[in-house]
Image: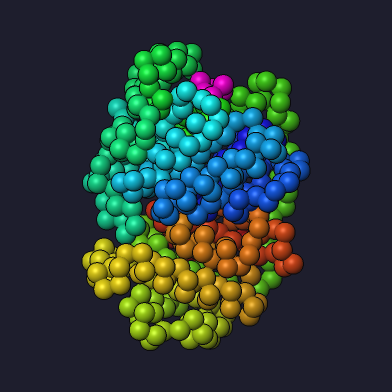
Amino acid sequence: MLLGAIADDLTGATDLALTLSREGMRTVQVVGVPPEGFTAGDAEAVVVALKSRTIAPQEAVSLSLAALERLRAAGARQIVFKYCSTFDSTEKGNIGPVTDALADTLGTQITIVCPSFPANGRTVYHGHLFVGDDLLSESPMKDHPLTPMRDSSLLRLMQAQSHRRVGLIRREIVAAGPQEVHAALEDARLAGNGIVVIDAICDEDLRTIGAAVADLPLVTGGSGIALGLPANFRRQGLLAPPATAKAFGALAGRAVVLSGSCSKMTREQIRTAVHAGMPALKIDPLQLAGGDLTPQAAVEWAIATKDAIPLLYSSADPAEVQKAQNALGRERAGALVEAFLAEVATALRAQGFSRFLVAGGETSGAVVEALRVPALFIGPEIDPGVPWTLGIGMDQPIALALKSGNFGGADFFLKAWDLLK
């Protein structure tokens, strides 16, 4: 084992595992903190998927440090802390507190922040995060129900969360090459910076940054930061040639889409699927709170769709989300939906459903936990950052596509199944 990664949600972990796998590392994704005595087998990278993005900062730190302990014990030489490419976080964290705790434990004086993921339109320029052509603060992320992002400056966002001084390496230095980036990191360290935001607007920038941080014990960023890390181990003669990919066989059984994400893209994917004739059941948190819709009723509805692929979704526009949060509270509204979809997934699995497409990081975490999936084998990529995976370590494996809310094209819910035929 060479690389150990800690992700703050399940879909992000899968995205990172896919990137590492594509770059030639044998990669295993583990759900939750690995057990004591965990070994990586023949894996060269292990990605630990936590559900720590929106929990209390001290709890996120505790889980992340426990994962770090297991990864180091299993032999990890470098650690990646992976968060969303839109830097999803609250005013108190959890990106800053977790970064600080990991860096302090590893004894490193400096680390980087780089959420850039150009393949999905996330770029960093002069320390500001862009989503497509828009600043983060002007993108749909400003209305996220759990982590509304109202500032685009990564320096301000990170400085508000971290006890370390935050600096910046601009694109001009990145474009000059790995040696210049490495020298700039050393200058930043000597100047007293403990964290450095690094600009990146294309994949080549990320590969340059990867080469420059080969000797850093800790690297933080979105999944794009992993593009340049495997090559470091290969240059050192530590990484074996890429193995032949294992076949990803389709599983017998019915399929279902479960969506808890309220992102703009997921809402577009739902509209596209419904317009194409996919049967859909909308789930309202107020209905759940009042007992007007039960998991059993939703399961019976899904089974009754027969040969079709049913779509159950709580996705709603910002005004609807705000109405539910005003009535129930932000945390309770989200928790009701997650628990409901998790219970529905468990019941459908018992009824022979074996192919689950889940939209939303929090929802994916709740569903995978309910289905008791201990680890995931990474399969074919559906859209950038979203692969099919196979739940392993189970009596009966299941196919899972775990989609971050903003990822995938408009036809994602329709075309994903073609890769399983």
**Where are the magenta residues, as a range?**
211-216
Spot occupied by residue 199 in the image (x, y as percentages of width and height): 37, 28
Q: Is residue 307 above or below residue 116?
A: below
Name the residue: 49% across, 81% down.
295
Residue 83 visible in rendering? yes
Q: Is residue 64 above or below residue 348?
A: above
Name the residue: 28% across, 35% down.
156
* Nearer-the-camera pick, 390 or 197: 197
* Nearer-the-camera pick, 8 or 260: 8
Quadrant assignment for the N terminus: top right
In the shown orientation, is residue 295 left or right of residue 349?
left
Name the residue: 47% across, 63% down.
363
Is residue 214 in the magenta section? yes
Q: How is the image coloured?
A: rainbow
Q: Quadrant of residue 375?
A: bottom right
Q: Is residue 21 above or below residue 276?
A: above
Query: Principal SS element in the magenta part?
Result: loop
Spot occupied by residue 367 in the image (x, y as percentages of width and height): 54, 66
Number of labels in the image equals 0
Spot occupied by residue 123 in the image (x, y as percentages of width and height): 36, 36
Q: Is residue 159 above or below residue 303?
A: above
Spot occupied by residue 258 in the image (x, y as percentages of width and height): 48, 69
Is residue 91 in the magenta section? no
Quadrant assignment for the C terminus: bottom right
Q: Quadrant of residue 369?
A: bottom right
Residue 120 visible in rendering? no
Name the residue: 37% across, 35% down.
162
